[in-house]
Image: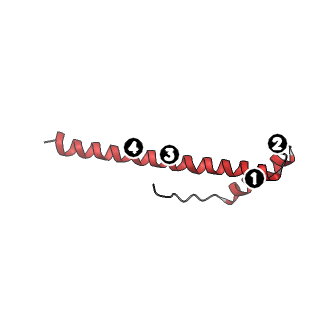
Amino acid sequence: MEKVAIYYKPEVEFYINELIFILYKDNYFSFLENAIEYKDKIIDFVERNITFVENMVRAIFSTKVMLELHDTFFLNK
């Protein structure tokens, strides 16, 4: 499976980094390191699922193209 490059807008990066401090400050996490680990898990989840969705779209598109080719060459004779 090919690697997909994901780029985040600066606003998104800022929000995610602020989330770490908000979660820590509001005592959702006792240690800052745990809040950072949580943020990393969120990023991993997003990146894994974007790759999955992209691959599903490619598979569907490929199937649609294959069906169209089949219809063109075999059904329209």
For the residues labelled 4 and 2, the Cα–Cα distance comes to 41 Å
Q: Which residue is mark 2?
A: 28
Q: CA distance from mark 2 to mark 1?
A: 12 Å
Q: Earlier in the sequence, mark 3 or mark 2?
A: 2
Whether residue 19 is visible to the viewer of this picture, yes or no, is no
The amino acid pointed to by label 3 is Val
Name the residue tied to disc 3: 53
* 76 relative position to 11: left or right: left
Quadrant showing the C terminus: top left
Q: Nearer the viewer, residue 12 or 32?
A: 32
Q: Amino acid at mark 2?
A: Tyr
Q: Are marks 3 and 2 in contact (CB under 8 Å)?
A: no
Q: Position of residue 20 (x, y in %)?
A: 78, 51
How many neighbours does mark 1 have within 10 angstroms: few (below 14), some (14-19), or many (20 or more)? some
Residue 18, horizontal then vertical, whole percent: 78, 53
Q: Nearer the viewer, residue 77 or 34?
A: 34
- Reading the chain from its start, which is encountered first: label 3 or label 4? 3
* Number of the front mark, 3 or 1: 1
Residue receiving disc 4:
60
Sequence-wise, which precedes: disc 2 or disc 1?
2
Q: Secondary structure at mark 1?
A: helix
Contact between labelled residues 2 and 4, with CB atoms less than 8 Å apart? no
Residue 34 shows in the view: yes
Circle nearer the viewer, 1 or 4:
1
Whether residue 10 is situated above or below residue 50 in the rendered picture: below
Q: How far apart are the two marked residues, 3 and 4, measured between alpha carbons?
A: 11 Å
Q: SS for tag 4?
A: helix
Q: Nearer the viewer, mark 4 or mark 2?
A: 2
Q: Residue at x 61, y 47 (%)?
A: 45
**Residue at 33% in and 43% down:** 64
